[in-house]
């Protein structure tokens, strides 16, 4: 194994010991394998760690722009490489950290596209056309309730365990980014869906015995499996295949704000580290307000 390959293996092992999520490990691993491949043309040897300087890293960064990656993708790949070199510097495997001088590209200020409450509730209620019978409708209904009714990320939803629920007080323990835990309440509709699903949930193999959401093989439902569930219902219930799991999280926050919830409370429910992340939902609400004004006020079109 090359020096860089061993360094990446050690770095990912450190992340695993730190209890970073499987989603994070997969993304970092894929980004760093691509990074290695760029510096290892066919038939050539992977460079030693000491040869990586700022000029080489800028060349690698420039080809990401040349390939017309989106800013969010470039930021993620760059974050993976910066984290690797920060680890190597901390472990004294390199003398200096050249990646710390690389700048992240600015993200365009785009607002999330949020369906209204009527569309979102229709989706969660899941009334499919005749002839479309999903194999696990009660599981799917609970998944949609967790995404919209509790504002969970998709990784948080599929990571739920049976013992994360306080069914008496209707509180839910959620493991968010960086394994940070938070408490989230859930409503009566979610409670009904939970009870209905648990009544038919089969026993899982020992490895996934505590997993709430199971797939057809009896293992824990994956991110991809859950995304497919959302896409199926979005397509056939409300006719909008662009709706994805994070859309429901956006809708959760936006609808709370529209109905009078304060930003600090929404921040806690979403598990945002910074209030500025939550504040983007105020822009969505203002946008909706302007639309109502433009459509309804007699002076709006003067």
Image: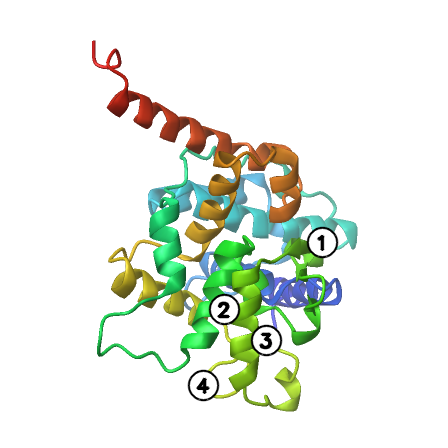
Q: Nearer the viewer, mark 2 or mark 3?
A: 2
Secondary structure found at label 1: helix
Pointers 4 and 1 in contact (C-beta within 8 Å): no
Is 220 situated above or below 4?
Answer: below
Q: Mark 2 near mark 3, Cβ–Cβ under 8 Å?
A: yes
* Chain-order first, disc 1 or disc 3: 1
Of the image marks 4 and 2, the number of the one nearer the N terminus: 2
Q: What separation in Å lies between label 4 and label 1 (alpha carbons)?
A: 42 Å
Counting from the top left corner in percent of width and height, residue 210 is at 66, 80
Q: Nearer the viewer, residue 279 or 202?
A: 202
Precedes in sequence: disc 4 or disc 1:
1
Tag nearer the camera, 1 or 3: 3
Q: Which residue is mark 3?
A: 212
* Neighbours of disc 1 within 10 Å: few (<14), some (14-19), many (20+): many
* Discs 4/3, front: 3
Front-lying residue, 195 or 155: 195
For label 2, the residue is 142
Q: Residue at x 62, y 83 (%)?
A: 208
Q: Nearer the viewer, mark 4 or mark 1?
A: 4
Q: Quadrant of the N terminus?
A: bottom right
- The alpha-carbon separation of the residues under discs 1 and 3 comes to 38 Å
Q: How many marks?
A: 4
Label 2: element kind: helix
């Amino acid at each position: 194994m090359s020096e860089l390959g061993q360094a990446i293996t050690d770095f990912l092992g450190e992340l695993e010991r730190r209890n970073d999520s499987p989603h994070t490990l997969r993304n970092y691993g894929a980004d760093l394998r691509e990074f290695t491949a760029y510096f290892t043309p066919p038939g050539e040897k992977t460079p030693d760690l000491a040869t990586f300087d700022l000029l080489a890293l800028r060349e690698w960064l420039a080809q990401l722009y040349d390939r017309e990656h989106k800013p969010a993708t470039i930021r993620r790949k760059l974050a993976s490489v910066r984290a690797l070199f920060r680890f190597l510097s901390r472990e004294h495997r390199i003398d200096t950290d050249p990646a710390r001088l690389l700048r992240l590209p600015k993200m365009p200020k785009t607002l999330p596209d949020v369906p209204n409450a009527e569309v979102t509730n229709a989706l969660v209620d899941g009334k499919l056309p005749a002839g479309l019978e999903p194999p696990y409708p009660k599981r799917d209904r609970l998944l949609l309730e967790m995404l919209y009714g509790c504002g969970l990320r998709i990784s948080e939803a599929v990571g739920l365990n049976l013992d994360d629920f306080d069914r008496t007080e209707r509180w839910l323990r959620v493991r968010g980014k960086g394994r940070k835990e938070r408490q989230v309440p859930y409503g009566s509709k979610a409670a009904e869906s939970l009870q209905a699903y648990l009544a038919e949930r089969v026993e899982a193999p020992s490895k996934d015995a505590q997993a709430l959401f199971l797939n057809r093989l009896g293992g824990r439902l994956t991110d991809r499996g859950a995304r497919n569930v959302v896409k199926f219902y979005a397509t056939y219930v409300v006719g909008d295949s662009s709706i994805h799991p994070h859309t429901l999280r956006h809708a959760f926050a936006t609808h709370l704000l529209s109905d009078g919830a304060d930003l600090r409370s929404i921040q806690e429910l979403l598990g945002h580290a910074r209030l500025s992340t939550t504040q983007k939902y105020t822009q969505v609400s203002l946008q909706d307000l302007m639309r109502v004004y433009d459509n309804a006020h007699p002076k709006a079109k003067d």
